[in-house]
Amino acid sequence: MTKQKRHHGDLYEALIVAGIELMEAGGPEALSLRKCAARAGVSHAAPAHHFNGVVSLKAAIVARSYGIFTKTMQAHREGISEPRARLIAICEGYLAFSREHNALFRFMFQPFADEAAQINPPILQELEARSAAAYDELAQACAAFAPVGGQARGTETLVWSLVHGYAMLFASREGSETPHGRPPDFAQILPEFQRL
Amino acid sequence: MTKQKRHHGDLYEALIVAGIELMEAGGPEALSLRKCAARAGVSHAAPAHHFNGVVSLKAAIVARSYGIFTKTMQAHREGISEPRARLIAICEGYLAFSREHNALFRFMFQPFADEAAQINPPILQELEARSAAAYDELAQACAAFAPVGGQARGTETLVWSLVHGYAMLFASREGSETPHGRPPDFAQILPEFQRL
DNA sequence: TGTACATCAGTGAACGCGCGTTCACTGATGTAC
DNA sequence: TGTACATCAGTGAACGCGCGTTCACTGATGTAC
């Protein structure tokens, strides 16, 4: 009944979605142009018309991931105006993303400097813009804690390091990889700073 | 003059060293059994007599890396007894390792649960022991800050997350990947906690 | 509205590559006597 | 000290695999007239 279309319609989009699904199912190793093409229901040579190489597809996937990342943080902070609660909510969003999209999360933060030259420029631009937008989300929540008339850079670095480390160490696939059982919740460890 | 030896002597060791050098030179992607064998000056089939598969070699490399990691932290804390200075020194060691062996550092903390079954049991045991020893180094330095008669688990989690996140975010190959230039030094961001 | 045609997103075959692993083998090592 | 021999760490060829990429092609799409 449904006539077989020769043209896919939006293969560019479909390849990104397929790539994300592949990574979430099998980690970064599971990603390949051929598997993305297969999952999008297209021959393995088709992607070449949309991406100038596998590196650009990877970059597009990372860019997309940053978009989801930012949206997750925004969803968590929505409606919260008290500065400290808002900052913690954003961190919870950060951690939620790292849990729910663990493979993407790890992939996003892998260094790619040596491959950057192979990325299609508009894709690289989008990647950088979305990455900056994610950082902004956190930075804006930190602004409330800056010294009057001063920079919040130190606070940003502190909070980002803390939440990122917590995510990397404890938000992996099962949460069972840590040697000592379930770690304390993120919000619970913050007061520990008074001891140091 | 030097007679060509058929037997290598300690190929097991040489393969691990070769693997570490390969990873440090070209990242995790650059590691393969064949390249390790070539670098050790041996045919590509030789490693099969020492490792029951590439996964075990990788695990042995990670185990070795944890050893270097622990030694680096110990070297930094040596001779320092004041608790806070000692804890910071260990963090500096943590960061030094992450800078000087960035590829190893990232590789060590990659999830491998799905491959664990393929690791030769004694190698897996060694890996777990060395990983625990590294954690102990940090945990012992945290003990001084535990509530009297209480657990230091919260402090450990806080400090580990913070230093690990900082390492992951800012200690990558060049240090130039961060979007906003050089971040504040680790020791400088600690006091920022008072603002939160 | 109908027709000619340029465009271009698909196909399927083919390429060369590096990989892990297996296999029969060989020859150095080191032990038993 | 000398000899026979078992062991086993190496070799080199071969396997099948999945990969990215190129190529000539084809046929659907959509525009110009």
Image: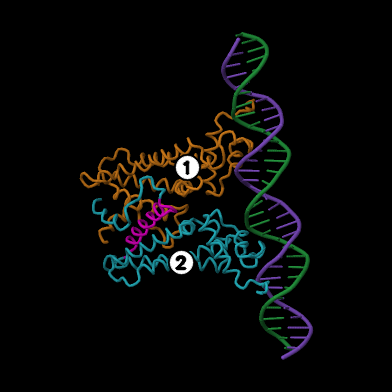
Chain colours: A cyan, B orange, C purple, D green
Tag 1–tag 2 contact (CB < 8 Å): no
For disc 2, the chain is A
Query: Residue A117's x, y, as percent?
Result: 57, 61
Looking at the image, residue A62 lies above or below residue D13: below
Query: Residue C14's x, y, as percent?
Result: 76, 56
Q: Quadrant of the N terminus of chain B?
A: top right
Q: Nearer the viewer, residue B79 or C32?
A: C32
Q: Residue furthest front?
A: A1
Helix, strand or loop for disc 1: helix
Residue at 50 percent across and 48 percent down: it is: B114
Query: Residue A8's x, y, as percent?
Result: 63, 71
Q: Residues within 10 Å of mark 1 (few under 14, many from 20)?
A: many
Image quarter of residue B51:
top right
The amino acid marked with disc number 2 is: Ile
Q: Quadrant of the C terminus of chain B?
A: bottom left
Helix, strand or loop for disc 2: helix
Q: Which mark is residue A19?
A: none
Q: Which mark is residue B62?
A: 1
Residue at 54 percent across and 39 percent down: it is: B18
Looking at the image, residue D23 lies above or below residue B25: below
The amino acid marked with disc number 1 is: Val
Q: Which stretch appears magenta?
A: A151-175
Main secondary structure along the magenta-highlighted residues: helix
Q: Mark 2 — residue?
A: A68
Q: Nearer the viewer, residue A48 or D17?
A: D17
Which mark lies nearer to you, 1 or 2?
Answer: 2
Looking at the image, residue C14 lies above or below residue B6: below
Query: Same subunit under labels 1 and 2?
Result: no
Query: Residue A174's x, y, as percent?
Result: 43, 52
Q: Is residue B6 left or right of residue A159?
A: right
